[in-house]
Image (cartoon, rainbow, N blue to C red):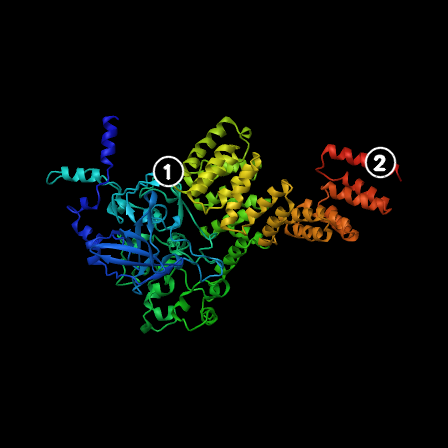
Amino acid sequence: MSCTQAQKEQSNEFTGSESCIECHENFYKLWQPSYHAQAMMPINAEFMAKHSVPNSESIDVEGHQFHVEFKDSTMMMYEYDGEKLVATYDVIYAMGGHNVYTFLTPFEKGKLQNIPLAYDANREEWFNYPMAGMRHFSDEYPDDEALPWKDDMFAFNTGCYSCHISQLSTNFDLKTDTYHTTWKEPGINCETCHGPAGEHVRIFKALKEGEEADKLGLISTKVFTQEQNNAACAPCHAKMNPITPSFMPGDKFFDNYNLTTLEDRDFYPDGRSLGENYTMTEWMMNPCIEMSDLHCVTCHTSSGRDRNRDNPNQACLNCHTNRIKDMETHTGHPEEVGLTCLSCHMPKREFVGRFLRSDHSFRPPMPEATIKFGSPNACNQCHKDKSPEWANQIVKARPNGDYQEETLQWAQMIKEARDMNWENVEKMYEYIRNPETDEVVANSLIRLLGNFPSASKTEVLIDALNNKSELVRSSAAYGLGGIITEKVKYALLKACQDNIRLVRVQAANAILSFPQDQFTSEQRTIIADAEKEYVASMTSRLDSWSNHYNMGLYHQNKGEVSQSLSSYETAARLYPESVLPLINSSVLYSYVGNNEKAEQNLKRVLDFDPKNEAANLNLGLLLAEQDRMDEAEKALLTAFEANPEQQAVAAKNLCVILANKGDLSGAVKYAEAAYKASPDNSDYGYTLAYYQMQNGQKSEAIRMLEKMVKGTPEFLPAMNFLADIYWRDGKKELAIKLYQDALKINGISDQDKAALRQALNTLKSNL
């Protein structure tokens, strides 16, 4: 190592919050009792003295009884099966405490695990923490179940770590699945926002009296732009996925993270939070961001306090002075009620896990959205004895009472897209193309279009690559994956050179599905640079099963089967409950002829989820290939019943199985279901007509074939089939006309035209 390198590494060292006390004692005293400082606290005498958390009563979790006791500056959890003591657990850290305390116990392989009991500081009671995480209050999650308390989702190392401690290194060993996690100090310290302070401390300690430093030696947030301030807070206050391990305050958020939006059912269709979404997505829907310089630190101190606690309307005064002066007219409530701007625009709600969050979208109450989508509204949060219909009448009677309409329109589209109802897809396209559409809404619709199997979306996605929002551009690039056209190719090449890393990463993912021989050497260099970033994004967290799953997809798309299988198996090993890597690997195992392993992985999925649609479909197809028809029929039927409106593949194969068993009426039933699920697939229409003929339903078969010949004349098997029926029925002129008309169709290959002419000549010679 060179001297310069050594000096640089030394200057970048983290020194801890105590190194700030000498010069910034007042700030340190403000920070020390703050939510940020106490995001994670060791269980010791100091914790006992400052936090009045009592011993718990016995609480049932998964059929066992748990309780915790504090004694001599320690905390222990006891697990019983009836009267029998099963296990004891040292509890060594507490997290939070603003509304809820959760607690950590050391686990195998270096994990820290949330214990299954948490303490509600507001209600002053202990509760079953995993059970409180269920979305039991929404139709969006009708079959939601509590996760086992030992699940990785409750592990500190994999879930809550980065927002509760400072300068963490997970030190994860992939070979042994073991953590050797270290951190500078618990809680969120000064250097989380200001970067390493080693150089800063040295600079100012070396100053002589009267001297001024020519540089600060750390990150100054005073010079941050609105975007930088928001981005600095977002990593801990966003539902996101990291694409780098190296974010520092001042960096661009979308150079380092991807954001979850309304494609996730933890949001109601109108964008209100259903689950814990950590604020950032709602914040990006806030109209005040576009219309002012408002940012997180406008209202919050760097330690997380509310700057305007004593005057809640303060932040709104710059733009809304008139409304604040006459709150009675604006709110429709007398002044003595005491409403503030926050009452209606930032109502606080309790989410899963009993956490409290304020709505940071700042949007007004929308009771009609409550009626249509079940989402909350501020009116009925206060007026609990009244109905949303009552509130909606009052809102609509206001002078601007139609303000809900736009939200209701796009929320309905979000709901339809989630339900894969594409009746209004053209309206979705209009919203995406409209430059005035909120970026979160446009992004959500683009992501949901991933489930729409139509090439009509291609131009919309290409246009979206020019959207001013980097988030929208990134999702549009990802959505173009698998669409192989020249126009898409050049659009993605441009996106691979976008100034935002997330866009480049998603463009690389999409463009790698193109054959590489379609690119010039210069173009391949562009792709290679973006591909490096894409691969790096999947190695930013080696302990993340989803990263290994995505790496499996990457290798699979490149035709690297062994590497793909290795990545899928690693993902399944890291999180055995993850079904996607098992399903995808089963397809590859079948491809390489290892049917035994393919079947084994699919049955592992069904052990977790017996009705899993994809696993049952793939298992049914695999068993059918092995002529194990009774088992195949059972699996395919389960897949079909999971999604009868859209499971065309299962229906088609059930049709063939039943036909081979002599059940022609059953075959027709499933052929009809396949065609109904995918009417644009000519093979399904042909199959239906074929088995209708087999079942003696000639007139129905003729109608089906005539419809196909009219709608998709280029599908020659239907024309041949219909011509054969006409010929056998003595309608020879009709049969000849079919061939004559077919020869006029554009787009039919020369080889097919030659075959048509030969068939036509044969018919004419037999007249």
Q: Secondary structure at mark 2?
A: helix
Callout 1 environment at 10 Å: few (<14), some (14 to 19), or many (20+)? few
Kindly identify the amino acid type of the residue bearing the numbered disc 1. Thr
Q: From the viewer's side, name the closer residue of 131 and 32.
A: 131
Position in image of residue 540 (x %, y %): 38, 39
- Front one among 687 and 357: 687
Residue sitting at 34 percent across and 45 percent down? 108
Q: Is residue 441 above or below residue 378?
A: above
Quarter containing the N terminus: top left
Q: Position of residue 433 (x, y in %)?
A: 52, 49
Say whether residue 642 is left or right of residue 291: right
Left or right for 138, reference 36: right
Q: Quadrant of residue 530?
A: top left
The tally of labels here is: 2
* Rendering coords of residue 329 (x, y %): 37, 70
Instruction: Give the numbered dot on residue 672.
Output: none
Disc 2 marks which residue? 762
Residue 501 in sight in this render: yes
Q: Quadrant of residue 182?
A: top left
Rounded to the nearest angstrom, the CA distance separating label 1 from label 2 is 71 Å
Q: Nearer the viewer, residue 408 or 478?
A: 478
Identify residue type, mark 2: Thr
User: Element at badge 1?
Assistant: loop
- Give the residue furthest to the right: 767
